[in-house]
Image (cartoon, helix red, strand yellow):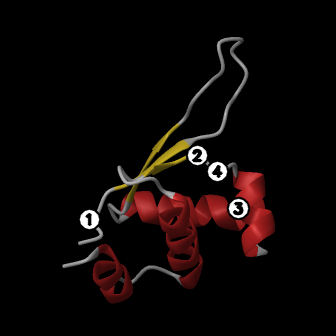
């Protein structure tokens, strides 16, 4: 079953589906991408808190892994998002 079929058959809210599709469009062939939450919020025309809720929904349902990253200086960097389902 493809990732999109699983996504559309899930009970995820629309916000989570929109965020997954956004991440899927930006992911490399290994399923990784690094967009910042403010960037996603601006481009999807959603609030940052809505983006965070959608990300939590996707993690809870097993569609996404989120890895927090930091710069060498200790400052926060963008998260690494990993899509967990195959596109095949």
At numbered mark 1, what does the secondary structure look like: helix, strand or loop?
loop
Residue 24 shows in the view: yes
Q: Earlier in the sequence, mark 3 or mark 1?
A: 3
Q: Position of residue 64 (x, y in %)?
A: 40, 57
Which mark identifies residue 40?
3
What's the CA distance linking mark 3 and mark 4?
A: 7 Å
Q: Earlier in the sequence, mark 2 or mark 3?
A: 2
Which mark identifies residue 35?
4
The residue indicated by pointer 2 is: 34
The reply to whether callout 2 and callout 4 are in contact (CB within 8 Å) is yes
Q: Which quarter shows the C terminus?
A: bottom left
Residue 57 against residue 64 in the figure, above or below = below
The residue indicated by pointer 1 is: 86
Q: Earlier in the sequence, mark 3 or mark 4?
A: 4
Q: Of residues 10 and 72, which is closer to you in this image?
A: 72
The reply to whether callout 3 and callout 4 are in contact (CB within 8 Å) is yes
Residue that protrudes farthest toward the left in the picture: 1
Q: Residue at x 36, y 79 (%)?
A: 7
Circle 3: is it few (<14), some (14-19), or many (20+) Cα within 10 Å? some
Q: Residue at x 71, y 11 (%)?
A: 73
At numbered mark 2, what does the secondary structure look like: helix, strand or loop?
loop
What's the CA distance linking mark 1 and mark 4?
A: 20 Å
Residue that protrudes farthest toward the bottom in the picture: 9
What's the CA distance linking mark 2 and mark 4?
A: 4 Å
At numbered mark 3, what does the secondary structure look like: helix, strand or loop?
helix
Q: Is residue 76 left or right of residue 1?
A: right
Residue 39 against residue 17 in the figure, above or below = above
The reply to whether callout 3 and callout 1 are in contact (CB within 8 Å) is no
Residue 87 against residue 60 in the figure, above or below = below
At numbered mark 4, what does the secondary structure look like: helix, strand or loop?
loop
The reply to whether callout 2 and callout 3 are in contact (CB within 8 Å) is no
């Amino acid at each position: 079953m493809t990732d999109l079929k699983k996504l559309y058959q899930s009970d995820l809210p629309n916000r989570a589906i929109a965020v997954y599709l956004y991440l899927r469009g930006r992911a490399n062939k290994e399923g990784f991408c690094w967009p910042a939450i403010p960037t996603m919020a601006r481009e999807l025309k959603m609030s940052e808190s809505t983006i965070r809720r959608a990300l939590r929904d996707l993690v809870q349902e097993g569609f996404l892994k989120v890895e927090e990253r930091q710069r060498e200086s200790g400052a926060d960097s963008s998260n690494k998002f990993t899509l967990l389902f195959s596109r095949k």
